[in-house]
């Protein structure tokens, strides 16, 4: 009978708090989710040192790759407080792929990074399940990622997520400010709520100052405050590509941190302004509640939150009806938000908001 194995007398990785077995268990749990989020160009499976993606270059004459990296911000604090982890990944994918599609690029694949205090396999699998669902919605592959256990640096229940996405677009079809013309029309696409920006202010106003409980039912929302705050970000990638395929789309603007005006200015050329009308839409009740409970000024609200507009398309005037029809068929709330005009001051603001929101 062989002698019993000797117990290590020195320090081990497990003694330092890193559980390799738990990490392996997490990988096994997340594999089915990653398998859902695939494309024909993906080579191999999860678990290799690198993800492989075949670029079928015959699809493009002169392909241009687009890349974007982002995270979710302090919306994570709400997910962790509610112990709900299977939707935050949708937000992560949205923040990345909807930056890509602004250029006209089709999202091809995404790789995620999860830094976590202690690997709980089911929690990691839930996070990745959300990322995989987001990739399915966006039409891209989840090509791989990394889960890093940071014992001693992060609390056991804490985690942060980020991702990088890669897309491709034909060089002659890259969208941007150089395509925008006077007379073009600005079309808004409705958001599902806060999306993934402004949560530091929202949490301060609603949770810290107003002391509203996350599990408390809110009549205006028809659900709990926590459920409202965790509503996943709408992913517009496929919707934008559908609009670009059927219209003379000039550019898109993903409305994230900085709000509607600042993000639309990023795709407006000098000499032109986007003239927008607030009366064309009413922001959701969550925005009104933050403004009222925190006595937040309109200027502060508009530079912090999307205010109900998650993506903007700028299209040729003759394509307005077609663009709206495409979005309506795809169940995306959409409306004419304004138009593009010559600027009185070419060096001044490139986005102007007029009027007031009804019932806000």
Image (cartoon, rainbow, N blue to C red):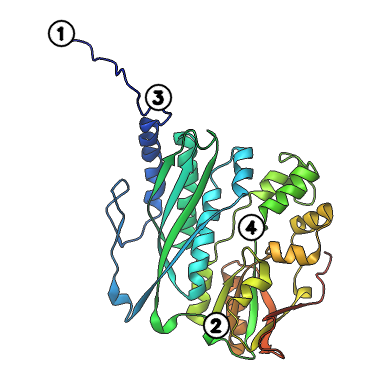
Residue beneath disc 4 = 197
Q: Which residue was labeled with disc 2?
A: 177
Tell me the element at label 3.
Answer: loop
Q: Where in the figure is residue 224, as x and y percent of width and height?
A: 72, 44
In the rendered image, residue 175, in percent from the top left (x then y), is placed at 49, 80
| Mark closer to the chain start, 3 or 1 | 1
* Residue under the image location 56 percent in, 53 percent down: 72
Write down the residue under mark 3. 15
Q: Secondary structure at mark 2?
A: helix
Q: Label 3 vs label 1: CA separation?
A: 30 Å
CA gap between label 4 and label 2 equals 24 Å
Q: Are marks 1 and 4 in contact (CB under 8 Å)?
A: no
Q: Say whether disc 3 or disc 4 marks the residue closer to the N-terminus.
A: 3
* Mark drawn on residue 1: 1
Mark 2, Cα crowd under 10 Å, few <14 / some 14-19 / many 20+, is: some
* Cα–Cα span, label 3 and label 4: 38 Å
Tell which circle, 3 or 2, labels the residue nearer the N-terminal end: 3
Mark 1 secondary-structure assignment = loop
Q: Residues within 10 Å of mark 1 (few under 14, many from 20)?
A: few
Q: Nearer the viewer, residue 212 or 316?
A: 212
Q: Is 358 above or below relative to 295?
A: below
The alpha-carbon separation of the residues under discs 1 and 2 comes to 77 Å
């Amino acid at each position: 009978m062989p002698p019993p194995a000797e117990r290590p007398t020195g320090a081990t990785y497990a003694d330092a708090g890193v559980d390799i077995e738990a990490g392996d268990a997490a990988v096994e749990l997340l594999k089915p989710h990653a398998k859902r989020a695939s494309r024909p160009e993906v080579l191999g499976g999860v678990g290799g040192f690198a993800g492989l993606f075949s670029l079928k270059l015959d699809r493009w004459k002169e392909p241009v790759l687009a890349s974007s990296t982002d995270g979710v911000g302090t919306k994570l604090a709400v997910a962790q407080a509610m112990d709900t982890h299977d939707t935050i990944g949708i937000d992560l994918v949205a923040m990345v792929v909807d930056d890509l599609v602004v250029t006209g690029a089709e999202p091809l694949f995404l790789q995620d990074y999860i830094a976590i205090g202690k690997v709980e396999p089911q929690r990691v699998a839930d996070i990745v399940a959300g990322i995989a669902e987001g990739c399915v919605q966006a039409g891209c592959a989840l090509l791989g990622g990394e889960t890093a256990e940071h014992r001693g640096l992060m609390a056991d229940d804490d985690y942060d997520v980020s991702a990088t996405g890669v897309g491709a677009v034909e060089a002659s079809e890259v969208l941007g400010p150089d395509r925008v013309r006077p007379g073009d029309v600005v079309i808004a696409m409705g958001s599902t709520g806060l999306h993934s920006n402004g949560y530091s202010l929202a949490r301060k106003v609603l949770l810290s100052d107003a002391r509203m409980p996350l599990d408390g039912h809110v009549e205006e929302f028809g659900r709990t405050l926590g459920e409202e705050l965790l509503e996943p970000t709408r992913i517009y990638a496929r919707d934008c590509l559908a609009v670009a395929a059927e219209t003379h789309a000039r550019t898109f603007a993903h409305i994230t941190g900085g709000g509607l005006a600042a993000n639309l200015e990023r795709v407006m050329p000098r000499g032109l302004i986007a003239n927008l009308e607030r009366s064309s839409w009413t922001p959701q009740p969550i925005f009104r509640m933050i403004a009222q409970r925190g006595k937040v000024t309109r200027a502060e609200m508009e530079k912090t939150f999307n205010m109900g507009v998650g993506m903007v398309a700028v299209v040729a005037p003759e394509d307005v009806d077609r663009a709206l029809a495409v979005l309506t068929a795809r169940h995306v709330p959409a409306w004419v938000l304004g138009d593009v005009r010559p600027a009185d001051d070419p060096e001044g603001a490139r986005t102007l908001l007029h009027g007031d929101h009804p019932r806000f």
